[in-house]
Amino acid sequence: MKIEEKFDNLIFDIKDKAKLVDKFIFDHLKYDNNDKLSKLYESSFHYIKSGGKRIRPYLLIKSYQLFGVNENLALPTAATIEMIHNFSLIHDDIMDNSDFRRNVEAVHKKYGLDYGILSGDFLIFYALNFLITKNINLGFNKDKVLAINNKIIETCIEICEGQALDLEFSKKNTLPSKEEYFLMVSKKTAALFSSSCYLGGFIAEVSYRDLEKLSNYGKYIGISFQIIDDLLGILGESEKMGKPVGSDIIEGKKTIPIILACEIGGENIKQKIISIINLKNKKPKDISFIVETMRDLSIDSKLKDLAKRYSNMAINEISNLEGDIEVKKYLIELANFIVERDF
């Protein structure tokens, strides 16, 4: 059974919420009608217009719906979360010198490096201003607005810390340990997943205990998501991923598939993989060697098992939560979908 058929209801719901978030973003996108500024706005919203899964805003909305009844109260923060995510993608692609994302040119390739840097900077400040303005318009009191804003700023700091750790990995000729990898992932990726779930519950005004459970759920599926993302970055189909096959090898990323292959493949394979990853100009045969080694070592199944463990930990966090049963089913299904997805 195809992944789209197995999770058809979930995928439909994700797309439905994505439409709501996108409409909210673009309905409220207003700027001075000045042609000289159009490039700034086009470059800043380039990735959002190109598509994307919208998993993070979806998590926020569903975490809110678990306890709340008016999803419109969650939309401004969900939209902000998506903009924050896209700011990180724009700058990440510059640092990785990536050419494509979501089957479109990377921002810095399409609009130039100067606009790549500027649009990422702009988007984070635009998002934070958007967040405050829209939540005040909803009638949230100042303490609530400030708490939401502070949580997102703290998360942005974590994302930047995670990116710094990732950069340090790339500067060394050695591989990071698993512990170092998971610390990086917990900040660079899982922090925003965790905050999305936390903020959904916070807007619904749930107890501290429930916020902690939601936050942990988000953290664990964030880690699971990144494990699968790293796997797909090497073994995924280019059309579905929006990037070339073996893109993470080309970029020299020292991700969990590389770490695991070196751990279980023996010293000769380890040294060969490390030497390829550290090459500036990799040949097709270099990429093929790593891809085939991954297949020979069954890295795919091993990492899916690892991702499944984190998704199960996520499910355990929310299994005893009170709230809307149907919404909880979607959150449980999402944890399973993240492991089985192929895009």
Image (cartoon, helix red, strand yellow):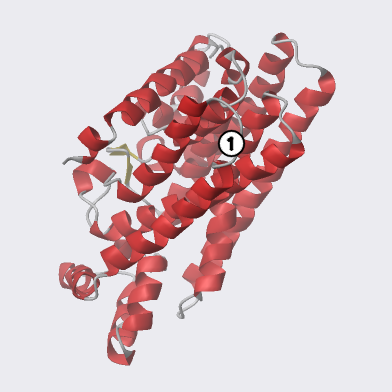
Q: Which residue is mark 1?
A: 196
Residue 13 in percent (x, y) is at: 38, 24
Q: In the displayed structure, would residue 283 be above or below residue 111?
A: below
Residue 237 in percent (x, y) is at: 20, 50
Q: Residues within 10 Å of mark 1 (few under 14, many from 20)?
A: many
- Secondary element under disc 1, as helix, strand or loop, is helix
- Picture mark count: 1
Q: Residue at x 41, y 39 (%)?
A: 334
Q: Residue lying furthest bottom in this view? A: 267
Q: Nearest the camera: 193 or 321?
A: 321
Residue 54 in percent (x, y) is at: 43, 32
Q: In the displayed structure, would residue 325 be above or below residue 303?
A: above
Image-quadrant location for residue 101:
top left
Q: In the displayed structure, would residue 30 be above or below residue 203?
A: above
Q: Amino acid at mark 1?
A: Ser
Q: Is residue 13 left or right of residue 245?
A: right
Q: Is residue 38 left or right of residue 183?
A: left
Q: Residue at x 29, y 44 (%)?
A: 343
Q: Is residue 215 left or right of residue 167?
A: right
Image-quadrant location for residue 72:
top right
Q: Residue lying furthest right in this view? A: 143
| Residue 278 makes an appearance in the image | no
